[in-house]
Image: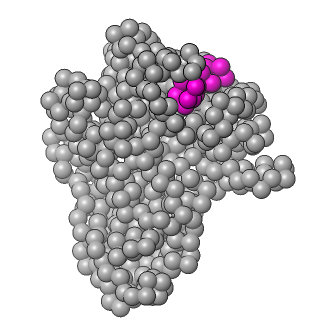
Amino acid sequence: MTSAHGSVDPRLAISDVDRRLFGGFVEHLGRHIYDGIHEPAHPSADADGFRTDVIELVKELGVSTIRYPGGNFVSGYRWEDGVGPVDQRPRRLDLAWHSTETNEVGLHEFSDWLEKVGSDLMLAVNLGTRGTQEAIDLLEYANVDAETDWTRQRRANGRDEPLAVKMWCLGNEMDGPWQLGHRNADDYGKLASRTAKGMRMVDPGIELVVCGSSGSGMPTFGSWERTVLEHTFDDVDFISCHSYYQEMGGNAQEFLASGVDMARFIESVVSIADAVAATKKSDKRIMISFDEWNVWYLHAEGGGQNDKPKETGWPVAPRLLEDQYHALDAVVFGDLMITLLQHADRVRSASLAQLVNVIAPIMTEPGGIAWRQTTFFPFSITSRLTGDRVVRVPVTAGTFTSERFGEVAAVNAVATVDDDGVSLFVVNRSTTDAADLRLDLAAVAAQFGRQLHVTESHLLHEDDMYAANTLEDPERVGVRPLEGLALDGDALTATLPPVSWAAVRLA
Ligand code: AHR
């Protein structure tokens, strides 16, 4: 048993919370759209062919903004293919995922689906095989309220009112050699700057995300951000971060240090962005859109960027990237959410990659059930319980030794505060020791002028940390109340088992 002592003090404010931190990501990839969210023959499908059981789960997950339509897919996508009468839409090769794209679902259908799930659209433009003109055309089609050829087409296709898409990504992972149209930082920076300027002439109210690195391990990481921001600093609002984590070589303890990696990544990008600001003598602060994050068994046999369909030909909606998540993955995932909240002053938007079937918290079987993966729980609970402001929760705890990061705190926590109470999120990263947690809430009582009470608590822990939810056993892993949780005067105490994530609401 290790001890973890700290306090919750609403005065240790990090930032207000931008709800876009709880964003998601839907890509035309594998069975995400087709046989995932859209399956007209499914018994639960609505008149538009969308699975209502999936809609209910996405609502329960609590996703704010959803990035669409990719991902690697967007770098070869012609957005015009996805509008107009469905029966006249072209079938195309999807070079990113070696599949056939039928274009049955496009901008209008996806926007309709977003209305059903209650999320906002975040669009990515193709800066891989296309450029400024096509990006401007799409923005005009989506956002402009004037009589033009594009807006007439939008109206004819069923949308009188502009879609009013606020956030736009200037391409996807342009630093990655796997990306269609991959280019160096200088070339991409110039293209992104030109495109951003043109897009702002169409709609000055949009927020723009320029591509950062597709991982902190990329050989160009750091210099990519610096060069790209030197070109685009005045044109954009956000720079993106992407990061995926997985257990390597059976080393669960190292995997549990993933939050440290994410924190360092964010802090490095913030430093680079602020250094560019300094050279430009600017007070402007570029924010981070962490628009791809998750656990992904990218380097597993048959997985990852090379996870192309095994069958010959160009299949429609093949099973790709259908990772099955276990309890350990969910604990790491919960810690990644804590890390995002701890950096909420600069990470103003984030997108869990992805949502359904493809490295996803929600899985479906064609004609069958939809179920929650283990990672569903930390996301839905954090999204639901997060209040208006994030506060630091300094915890003194035991440590473990990470190969990459040296001594790492076994317990990591953050809290949020709102007018009605406090929410606490905490993880025990140790694979061996339970943590005896003791938090002083005197400052919380002082702030509210009274003692708060625990109104709900959730623990995610399995004695078998590799337990998972499957088609055969879809409810094997879930959350349960945190046993032994006590509030005695100002002291909140609980025991966190090894490899566990917990949330507590006080109101
Ligand atoms: O999320 C899966 C893929 O990961 C995305 O298409 C790409 O942007 C990233 O490399």
Tell which residue pokes out farthest to the front in this image: 147
Q: Nearer the viewer, residue 154 or 139?
A: 154
Residue at 31% x, 25% y: name it. Answer: 34
The overriding secondary structure of the stretch rendered in magenta is helix
Question: On the rendered image, what quadrant is the C terminus found in?
Answer: bottom left
Asked whether, in this view, residue 372 is left or right of residue 101, the answer is left
Asked whether, in this view, residue 97 is left or right of residue 14, the answer is left
Task: Give the residues drawn in magenta, as a range.
Answer: 130-146
Q: Where 278 sits versus 480, above or below? A: above
Image coordinates of residue 289 in percent, x first then y, are: 57, 46
Image coordinates of residue 434 in percent, x first then y, are: 34, 73
Q: Where 343 sits versus 495, above or below? A: above
Image coordinates of residue 72 in percent, x first then y, are: 51, 27
Q: Nearer the viewer, residue 171 or 16?
A: 16
Asked whether, in this view, residue 145 is left or right of residue 31, the answer is right
- Asked where in the image residue 113 lies, by quadrant, the reply is top left
Q: Where 417 sits versus 254, above or below? A: below
Total marks placed: 0
- Asked where in the image residue 489 lies, by quadrant, the reply is bottom left
Image coordinates of residue 134 in percent, x first then y, are: 61, 20
Residue at 17% x, 33% y: name it. Answer: 44
Question: On the rendered image, what quadrant is the N terminus found in?
Answer: bottom left
Res 81 seen here:
yes
Q: Is residue 67 magenta?
A: no
Residue at 24% x, 56% y: name it. Answer: 478
Q: Where 479 sits versus 114, above or below? A: below
Residue at 35% x, 18% y: name it. Answer: 104
Res 257 seen here:
no
Q: Nearer the viewer, residue 243 or 139?
A: 139
